[in-house]
Image (cartoon, rainbow, N blue to C red):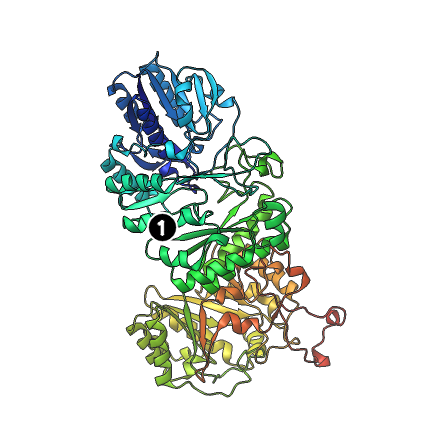
Amino acid sequence: MGRVLVLSPPATIARDFIDYPYFADLGAVQLAAALRARGEAVTLLDAFALESSTLHWRKDGRGHLGASVDEVLAHVERAAPPDAVIVTVTPFHRPPHRDDVLAAVLRGVRSIHPRAPLVLADAYQSGQHYVEVGDALLASYPEARAWLKYEAETSVGEALGREGVIRGADADLDALPPPAWDLVDLELHDRFRARVVARSERPRWHFPIEGRTLPMVSSRGCPFRCAHCSSNPGRAPGAPKTQRRMSAATLAAHLGALRAHGVTRVALLDELVNVHRSHFDEVLRLVELHDLALEVPNGFRADYLSRAHLERLRGRVTTVSVSAESGSQRVLDEVVDKQLDLRDIERVAADAREVGVPLLVHFMIGLPGETDEEINATLSLALDLFDRHGAEPAVQYATPLPGTRLAAGRMLPVVEDWGPRFQKVPTDDAARLAKFRWTFEQRLAASRGPEKLIMNVTYACNNHCTFCAVGTRTQLDGHPPSQRAHLERYRAHGVTMVDFDGGEPTLNPELIPLVRHARAIGYERINVTTNGRRLSYEDYARALVTSGLTTLLFSVHGPDARTHAQQVGVAEAFDQTMAGIAHARRHAPEGVELGMNVTLTKGNHDRIEAIAELALERGLPWLNVQFLTPFGRATRWVAPDTQAAADRVMRVIDRFADRMKIQVINLPFCFMPGYEAYVAGDLGKLARHMVFVNNETVNLAAYLAERRTKRPVCAPCPHACFCGGFYELDDVPEPPWLIAPEDLVRAPVSG
């Protein structure tokens, strides 16, 4: 009998880490149990269960997970002198490269116990990415005499007496004792997990670890052959992938042992827990028997997940996770080789919504041979499942870990530091993929809200704009009691933002009372868009800007009286609007934001720089540049050439973006390459609800989409999932006196 020190060292993680590094000690705890069952005297030193165990962010951006190296080594010194030391090495130590934290631990152990054999062990437990490396690992850590690869429990005795690389065989899971959590200070372990949650900077945990949460695996391996997966390490070339599962009796013993340790939540780390129906049913039965919360971070196969399973999981899991990988069945079949029908993803999403179980769906982009159209199919499926069923999308970049078929076939460049790759840095063709990912995130943010109510309080207007979207409607005011009822109904559903629009909203005598009512019932952001003419009466301007609104936008369509009048049809409008702006600036309370709207037409698009200058000169450091929408009076003969207008807007951004907020509205992204961050697409209005004067309500994005069309050029566009396409304006013949010579050659294309 010998004395063995098993050490689970601290690790480092990328800021956007994948997998579950806070469970990386399971391999060491299971190995300690196996050694003890062999008759060894075991000391287990878990860096996740010491006084200083925590997560802190290093200057290089990586997170140190666990106790400090100094505290770990202090415990090594205090422990009884061992006959051998086994240190577990995980993917979070980035093998085969020499990790600074692990290296410091090994140097210290070797200095403290120079004669004791020092062995590295994978202690593979399934459920986390395995990184296949050759003999280079020992070259990186000369402090160690041996490296035990794969499943350490079966060959650990042999490893203590040998040097070099020792291959562990597949363990008989029924022969393994429950992990030796009795050798771990679980109170300190709980504190460590609480510190991880507090310091992780994650806004949301799909798989919480609060309370006494401990990991376990009920199976090892996976029978499926997905090209990006590194499961079943050590499998002989050409051998089939298989899964080994605990028997019902062993499963009961392991879960019972966890319950005896005071566990309230089990993190089941199986690579695929539900592929065998009777095994999964037994897991659920035992979890219910012990009244345990259950988290399954690696998720489920959708095609093996029934509605009955979801009903049993409801209230017991925080999130059910499934993997679609791609929205293209061809990519799924020919590239990923997942052997999954996407219709099962749709079915599970619908069932989860109806049952009331939160669902997370995983996707990848950047797979080898994947076309731009197929990437858009993936992003479209992810967004559709979110919009229709509330299924949370998790989109990552395809990353070829060593040991996967993606890496073995050199289908993508193999990377040395995979930590940030899945979330932030594409492995290949980074600039292209980043555009797809950026657009997806913008679109997803738009779907999340926050929701806004847009209320047309009147169709009356004292201007006669050539492009007015409601200019063909009867000039009526809204019904005040109905408008208050709409405000109250949307507020009761959690909406906290409202825009009051028109027509010209200041012509409705109920505007200021409506603003005050909105503020009184809890609206936090209240905007009024106005032509500003009525604010030329200073008393009215003072009353409006102090009524509770938070933003006031002035519609100005030219930098001078002549240009503005040509667009709005009223000679004196410019001077009155400028007076209204001055009065608003004079009386606006602190915190009320003032800005300017301009709609681009043939008559003013070449004056946009001067309009931006005017906005700054008049104290309005916010400019919304709007392209025409095909509603009301807006027709082709009013619209400028879209690309020419967009080119001028890009020059405005170059000149003024450091001094004012600029937003471009109703324009496809493709007209402004490189300036996408300034473009707000129609699909950004998914959380916008419009109430017309006649009390008709519409979703604004759906309303605008009625006149949007997609063209063949849209299919591969990296912005397709956020862009509604091109507006088609009415093809009204232009009066001959309005046709410029260049228009006889090239008709304008509206965006």
Which percent across, then down, holds residue 254? 32, 39
Which percent across, then down, holds residue 23? 36, 38
Going by the image, does 546 lie left or right of 94?
A: left
Going by the image, does 291 lie left or right of 460?
A: left
Q: Secondary structure at mark 1?
A: helix
Q: Is residue 653 visible?
A: no
Q: Residue at x 62, y 73 (%)?
A: 603
Instruction: Name the quadrant containing residue 16.
Output: top left
Instruction: Specify the quadrant that holds the C terminus.
Output: bottom right
Query: Identity of the amino acid at label 1?
Result: Leu
Which percent across, then down, holds residue 153? 39, 27
Q: What residue would you read off at disc 1?
A: 284
- Residue 375 versus residue 653: which sits nearer the camera? 375
Q: Is residue 233 above or below residue 316?
A: above
Which percent across, then down, holds residue 404? 55, 36
- Residue 96 versus residue 290: which sits nearer the camera? 290
Q: Residue furthest top?
A: 115
Instruction: Specify the quadrant that holds the N terminus.
Output: top left
- Residue 506 versus residue 217: which sits nearer the camera? 217
- Residue 426 versus residue 453: which sits nearer the camera? 426
Q: Residue at x 39, y 50 (%)?
A: 281
Q: Residue at x 42, y 23 (%)?
A: 155
Q: Residue at x 62, y 44 (%)?
A: 368
Q: Is residue 360 visible?
A: yes
Q: Residue furthest right?
A: 745
Q: Residues within 10 Å of mark 1 (few under 14, many from 20)?
A: some
Give the number of marks: 1
